[in-house]
Image (cartoon, coloured by chain):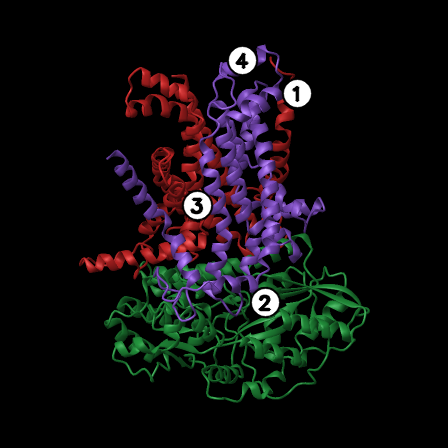
Chain colours: A red, B purple, C green
C-alpha cells in the first residue's frame, strides 16, 4: 500500500457527492414512481409491477426498443472509426490546421434546431438531395417520410454531429501516447501503418472502448435527431419511435403518465447499464489475452 | 504530394462540416427583403443590422456575463474534481474502486429529462432555487469527465510513479506534480466540454431560475422566438452570438490538445 | 413548440353588446385585503410588449396603494417544463398566464382558485364562450380569467394557384371545392396542405368530438372526413411530410412556398412580412372553411394558483389585466382580440381602412362573434399524438379510415381516466 486507506475516498469525495446528490438520488426517486400510476401533477397509488406488465404488452415499447437497438448498431462502428481517422489527419500540424480542426468541431456546437433545419432542407421531399435526384432522372426518395429511411437519415446526422466531438477525445488521447514508444518503433523500422496498429491502437484502446461505450449509450438514447427530422414525432404513424422519444411522448406536459414514463426510463437505464458492463467485460477479457 | 493529399482530405471534411454554420451566418446577414426559409448561402444585401437588433431585444451582455460566470466555475470544478476522482480510479488501489467506477458510469446513463423535476425538488429542499449556484451544481463534476480523465491517467507509464513512491512522495504530491501535468491534453478537453455544456445548457437554468437578472444567454436568446413575432434573422444572429465564444475558445485551445506529452513528467 | 390551444367544444355564443361594466376591478375579492407583493408570470411577451405590461402593472399599483407586482416573463420554449416544476413543488407564481390546455390539468388536480366561487361578479364581464373555456366540463367552476383570443383566415398562395390554372381570386369556400382545387394543384405537382387534420379540423367539418365523457370523433362523419383526406393524399395534395407535421412545421412549409394553402392567425401576416417577403407579395386571404358556420378560435388566460399566499391581490390583478380597457389596448398592439364582452365594440375592430392588416383584423373580429373553441379541453398532448399517428397509418393505407379513428378514440378515452 502506498497510501492511507481513506486517501482514495478523499480524492473521490467531491465527485461522488455531486453524482449521488444530483443524479443518483433524484434517479432513485424516479424509480419509486415507476411502481405507481403517478401523473404529472403528483398523486399516484402504488400499483406494483403493473407498469412493467403494461410495457411487455405495449407494441410501441418493443418497436422503440428495436429501433433504439438498430440505431445503436448503426452508429457505433462509424463513430469509433471515423473520428479516429479524422483525429489522425488533424493531429499533424500543418499551416492552417487550427482552422480545420475548428471547422470540424462546428457541428458539435451548432444548435440542434439549426442542424435539424439544415438536414431537413437537404433531405425533405423537395430538398436539395431530392432535387438532384430528380434532375438526374430519378424519383424523389422519402428520406424523412419512410420510417426506415428516417432512421437511417437520423443516423447520418448523429454520425455527422459526433465526428468533431469524438475527434477531440481522440486528439487528447493521441497526445497522451508516449512519444518514445513511436520513436522506439521507428528505430525498429516500422512504417506508419504498422506503427498505427502496433503503437497507436494499443495505447488508444481504453479511449476506443470509451468512445464505443459513449456512442452506444448515446445511440441507444437517440432523441433530438429523429425528433427534429420528423417534425417532433416518431415518424409517420410513430413507426420510427425510439426509447427516449417514447418516454418523452408518454410523460410530456401536465397530462403525462409519469408512472409509466418512469418505468420506461428505468428499463432504459437497466438496458444501458447492461450494455456498458458487457463492453467493459469484453474489454477486460481481451486485455487479459 | 503527400501534403496535397492531406489538404484534399482536410478540405473534404471541412466542406461536410461547416455547412450549417455558414448557412446560419448567411441568414443572420440577410436583409429584410429576403426570404429566410430558403437554403441559399449568399445574402443579396448583407447587413450587420440584425446583430444590433438582437442587442436591442435582449440584454446580451448581462446574460452573457451570467453564462460566463457559470461556465467558468464549471470549468474549474470539473477540471479539479474530475481529475481527482479520475486519478483515484486509475492510480490508487483500494477496496470499493470498482463500485465507485460503476457509480460514475451509471450517472452517465441517467436520462436528465427523467430526473428534471426530482432534481428541482432537491434544489428546493436545499433552498437553492433561483441561484446561480443551483445552475452550476448538477454539472459541477460530470461523470463523463471523470471517466475521460481516468482513461488519461491509465495511459501513463507506471515506472515514473513507482520511482516517485520510492522517493517518498505521497498520493497528493504524485497527483499534482506527476499525473496532472502529463494529462494536460485531456484536461483541456475537459475544460472545453465543461464550458460548452454549461454555455449551451437551457432547460435546467430555465427551470431553476426565476429572476431575470440571473438568466443565462441561452434563455435570453429564447426570447427572440417571440409569441406573436418571430424574426428568423434575429434568431440566426442570436445563435451566432452564442456560438462565437465557443468557436474562439476552441481555436485557442485546440493546439493544447497536444501539449503535455513528456512535458513535466520526470524522464525516468 | 408554438402555442397550441386546446379549448372546450361549446355552443357558439354570439357576441352582442351585452354585459356589465368591464371597467376596473373592484375591491370585492372574497378573502382579504388587496395589498402586498405578488408575482405575475407571462408566456413570452418580452421584449415586444414590455412597455405595455409595465404600464398595466403601474396602473394597478397606483390604484391599489401598497401592492407590488413582480413581473416575470418566460420564453415559450420550455414554458411547460417550468410550469410543471413549479406545480410539482407548489411554487407557482401568484398569477400565471396559461392557455386552457394547461389550466385544465392544473384545475383538475385542484391547484387553481375557482373564480366562480371567489369572484361571483366577474363572469358577465367576459364573453360566454371564453369563460367556458376555463371551466371543467361537467363539473362547473371557472379556473382562469379569459385573456386574449385569436382566430384567423386561411392564407393561400396566389402564384401557385395561377400555376395550376386556378383563379387566384376564387379560393375554396367549402370542403368539396378544397378537394377539387387541391387535385388540380396536385396535377401540376403542387401540394396544397401541410398537415393531416387536427381535432379542431374535425370540429370544423361538423364531426361530434366529445359527448357524455367520451370522445366520439369516430362517428360516420369523422370517417367521411378522413376518407376525403385519404383521397387528397393519394392524389398528392398533401406534402409527404404532412403525416408528421405539427402546426408550426406546416406553417414553415407554407412560407417556403411548398404548400398552397394554410390556415393561420391574424398575426401570421406580420410573420410573412418579416420571414417570407416573396410569399407576402402574393398571399391570398380567405375565410376559414367550415361546415358549421363557425370558425375556430384560440385563447389564453390567467389563473391564480391555490398555493398563492396573497390570493386577494392575485385575483384583483388577474381581473385587472384582463379587463376591457387593458385588453383592447393589448389587442391593438399584438393582432389579437379581447375576450371581454365589451372589447369587441371598439371601432378598431370594425373599421377597415383598406390595408391587409385591417382587412384580416375586421374579418377575424367578425368571425369571433360566432367562433368556437373546437378542441375539447380534455384533449391532451398525448391524445394529439395518438390521433396524428393513427391518421398517418390511414393515409399510408395501413388501416382503413374507420379502423384508424376507432383506434385513436380508444386511446384517447383510455388517457381520459
Would residue A242 be found to the left or right of residue B213 on screen? left
Foreground: disc 1 or disc 4: 4
Q: Chain of mark 1?
A: A
Please identify the quarter of the rendering in which residue C15 is found: bottom right
Instruction: Tell me residue B213's x, y (percent).
Output: 66, 56
Give the distance between the C-alpha atoms of the residues marked 2 and 4, in whole angstroms.
64 Å
As helix, strand or loop, the secondary structure at mark 3 comes to: helix
Give the distance between the C-alpha atoms of the residues marked 3 and 2, in whole angstroms.
31 Å
Instruction: Tell me residue C130's x, y (percent).
Output: 59, 76
In this view of the protein, which residue sits in the foreground, C327 or C21? C327
* Above or below: residue C391 compared with residue C373: above
> Do marks 1 and 2 share a subunit?
no
Q: Residue furthest left?
A: A137
* Residue at numbered disc 3: A108
Instruction: Tell me residue B20's x, y (percent).
Output: 39, 53
Give the distance between the C-alpha atoms of the residues marked 3 and 4, in whole angstroms.
40 Å
In the rendered structure, are the residues bearing label 1 and label 2 in contact, judged by CB atoms less than 8 Å apart?
no
Q: Chain of mark 4?
A: B
In the rendered structure, are the residues bearing label 3 and label 1 in contact, judged by CB atoms less than 8 Å apart?
no
Asked whether the viewer can see residue A39, the reply is no
> Do marks 3 and 4 share a subunit?
no
Residue C45's disc is 2
* Residue at numbered disc 4: B162
Give the distance between the C-alpha atoms of the residues marked 1 and 4, in whole angstroms.
20 Å
Amino acid at each position: 500500500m502506498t497510501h492511507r486507506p481513506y486517501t482514495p475516498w478523499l480524492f473521490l469525495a467531491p465527485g461522488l457527492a455531486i453524482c449521488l446528490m444530483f443524479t443518483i438520488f433524484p434517479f432513485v426517486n424516479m424509480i419509486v414512481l415507476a411502481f405507481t400510476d403517478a401523473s404529472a401533477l403528483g398523486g399516484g397509488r402504488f400499483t406494483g409491477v403493473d407498469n412493467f406488465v403494461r410495457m411487455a404488452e405495449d407494441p410501441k415499447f418493443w418497436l422503440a426498443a428495436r429501433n433504439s437497438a438498430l440505431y445503436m448498431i448503426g452508429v457505433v462502428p462509424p463513430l469509433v472509426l471515423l473520428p479516429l481517422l479524422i483525429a489522425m489527419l488533424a493531429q499533424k500540424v500543418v499551416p492552417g490546421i487550427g482552422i480545420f480542426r475548428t471547422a470540424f468541431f462546428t457541428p458539435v456546437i451548432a444548435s440542434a434546431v439549426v442542424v435539424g433545419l439544415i438536414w431537413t432542407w437537404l433531405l425533405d421531399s423537395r430538398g436539395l438531395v431530392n432535387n438532384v435526384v430528380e434532375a438526374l432522372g430519378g424519383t424523389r426518395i422519402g428520406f424523412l417520410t419512410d420510417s426506415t429511411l428516417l432512421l437511417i437519415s437520423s443516423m447520418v446526422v448523429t454520425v455527422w454531429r459526433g465526428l468533431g466531438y469524438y475527434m477531440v477525445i481522440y486528439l487528447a488521447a493521441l497526445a497522451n501516447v508516449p512519444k518514445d514508444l513511436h520513436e522506439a518503433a521507428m528505430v525498429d523500422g516500422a512504417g506508419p501503418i504498422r506503427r498505427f496498429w502496433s503503437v497507436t491502437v494499443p495505447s488508444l484502446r481504453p479511449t476506443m472502448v470509451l468512445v464505443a461505450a459513449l456512442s452506444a449509450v448515446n445511440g441507444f438514447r437517440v432523441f433530438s435527431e429523429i425528433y427534429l427530422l420528423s417534425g417532433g414525432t416518431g415518424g409517420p404513424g410513430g413507426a420510427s419511435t425510439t426509447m427516449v422519444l417514447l418516454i418523452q411522448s408518454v410523460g410530456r406536459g401536465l397530462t403525462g403518465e409519469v408512472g409509466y414514463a418512469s418505468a420506461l426510463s428505468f428499463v432504459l437505464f437497466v438496458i444501458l447499464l447492461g450494455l456498458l458492463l458487457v463492453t467493459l467485460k469484453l474489454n477486460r477479457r481481451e486485455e487479459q489475452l | 504530394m503527400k501534403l496535397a493529399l492531406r489538404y484534399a482530405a482536410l478540405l473534404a471534411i471541412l466542406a461536410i462540416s461547416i455547412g450549417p454554420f455558414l448557412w446560419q451566418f448567411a441568414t443572420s446577414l440577410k436583409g429584410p427583403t429576403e426570404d429566410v426559409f430558403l437554403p441559399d448561402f449568399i445574402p443579396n444585401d448583407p447587413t450587420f443590422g440584425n446583430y444590433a437588433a438582437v442587442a436591442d431585444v435582449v440584454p446580451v451582455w448581462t446574460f452573457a456575463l451570467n453564462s460566463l460566470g457559470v461556465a467558468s466555475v464549471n470549468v474549474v470544478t470539473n477540471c479539479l474534481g474530475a481529475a481527482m476522482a479520475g486519478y483515484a480510479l486509475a492510480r490508487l488501489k483500494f477496496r470499493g474502486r470498482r463500485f465507485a467506477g460503476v457509480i460514475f458510469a451509471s450517472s452517465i446513463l441517467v436520462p436528465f429529462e427523467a430526473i428534471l423535476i426530482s432534481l428541482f425538488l432537491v434544489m428546493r429542499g436545499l433552498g437553492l432555487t433561483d441561484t446561480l449556484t443551483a445552475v452550476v451544481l448538477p454539472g459541477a463534476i460530470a461523470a463523463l469527465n471523470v471517466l475521460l480523465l481516468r482513461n488519461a491517467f491509465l495511459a501513463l507509464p507506471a515506472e515514473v510513479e513507482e520511482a516517485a513512491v520510492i522517493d517518498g512522495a505521497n498520493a497528493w504530491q504524485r497527483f499534482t506534480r506527476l499525473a496532472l501535468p502529463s494529462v494536460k491534453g485531456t484536461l483541456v478537453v475537459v475544460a472545453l466540454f465543461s464550458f460548452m455544456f454549461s454555455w449551451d445548457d437551457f432547460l435546467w437554468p430555465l427551470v431553476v431560475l426565476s429572476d431575470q437578472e440571473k438568466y443565462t444567454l441561452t434563455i435570453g436568446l429564447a426570447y427572440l422566438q417571440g409569441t406573436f413575432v418571430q424574426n428568423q434573422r434575429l434568431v440566426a444572429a442570436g445563435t451566432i452570438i452564442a456560438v462565437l465564444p465557443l468557436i474562439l475558445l476552441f481555436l485557442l485551445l485546440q493546439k493544447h490538445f497536444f501539449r503535455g506529452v513528456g512535458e513535466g513528467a520526470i524522464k525516468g | 413548440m408554438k402555442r397550441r390551444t386546446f379549448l372546450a367544444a361549446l355552443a357558439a355564443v354570439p357576441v352582442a353588446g351585452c354585459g356589465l361594466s368591464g371597467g376596473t376591478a373592484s375591491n370585492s375579492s372574497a378573502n382579504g385585503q388587496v395589498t402586498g407583493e405578488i408575482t405575475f408570470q407571462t408566456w413570452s411577451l418580452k421584449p415586444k410588449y414590455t412597455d405595455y405590461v409595465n404600464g398595466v402593472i403601474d396602473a394597478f399599483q397606483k390604484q391599489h396603494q401598497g401592492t407590488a407586482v413582480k413581473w416575470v416573463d418566460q420564453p415559450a420554449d420550455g414554458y411547460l417544463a417550468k410550469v410543471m416544476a413549479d406545480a410539482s413543488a407548489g411554487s407557482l407564481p401568484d398569477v400565471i398566464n396559461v392557455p386552457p390546455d394547461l389550466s385544465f390539468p392544473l384545475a383538475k388536480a385542484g391547484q387553481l382558485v375557482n373564480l366562480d366561487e371567489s369572484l361571483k361578479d366577474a363572469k358577465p364581464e367576459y364573453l360566454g364562450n371564453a369563460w367556458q373555456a376555463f371551466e371543467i366540463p361537467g363539473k362547473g367552476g371557472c379556473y382562469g380569467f379569459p385573456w386574449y383570443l385569436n382566430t384567423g383566415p386561411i392564407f393561400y398562395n396566389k402564384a401557385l394557384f395561377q400555376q395550376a390554372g386556378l383563379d387566384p381570386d376564387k379560393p375554396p369556400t367549402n370542403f368539396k371545392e378544397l378537394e377539387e382545387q387541391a387535385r388540380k394543384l396536385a396535377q401540376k405537382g403542387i401540394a396544397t396542405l401541410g398537415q393531416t387534420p387536427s381535432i379542431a379540423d374535425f370540429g370544423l367539418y361538423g364531426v361530434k368530438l366529445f359527448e357524455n365523457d367520451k370522445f366520439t370523433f369516430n362517428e360516420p362523419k369523422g370517417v367521411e372526413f378522413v376518407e376525403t383526406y385519404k383521397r387528397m393524399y393519394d392524389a398528392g395534395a398533401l406534402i409527404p411530410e404532412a403525416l408528421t407535421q405539427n402546426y408550426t412545421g406546416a406553417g414553415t412549409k407554407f412560407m417556403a412556398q411548398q404548400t398552397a394553402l394554410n390556415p393561420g392567425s391574424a398575426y401570421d401576416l406580420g410573420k410573412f412580412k418579416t420571414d417570407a417577403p416573396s410569399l407576402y407579395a402574393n398571399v391570398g386571404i380567405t375565410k376559414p372553411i367550415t361546415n358549421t358556420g363557425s370558425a375556430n378560435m384560440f385563447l389564453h388566460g390567467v389563473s391564480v394558483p391555490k398555493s398563492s399566499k396573497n390570493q386577494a391581490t392575485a385575483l384583483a390583478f388577474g381581473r385587472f389585466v384582463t379587463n376591457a380597457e387593458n385588453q383592447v389596448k393589448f389587442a391593438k398592439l399584438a393582432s389579437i382580440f379581447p375576450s371581454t364582452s365589451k372589447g369587441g365594440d371598439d371601432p378598431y375592430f370594425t373599421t377597415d381602412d383598406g390595408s391587409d392588416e385591417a382587412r384580416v383584423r375586421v374579418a377575424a373580429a367578425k368571425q369571433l362573434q360566432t367562433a368556437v373553441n373546437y378542441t375539447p379541453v380534455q384533449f391532451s398532448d398525448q391524445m394529439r399524438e395518438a390521433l396524428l399517428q393513427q391518421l398517418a397509418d390511414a393515409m399510408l393505407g395501413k388501416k382503413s379510415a374507420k379502423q384508424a379513428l376507432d383506434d385513436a378514440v380508444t386511446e384517447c378515452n383510455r388517457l381520459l381516466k
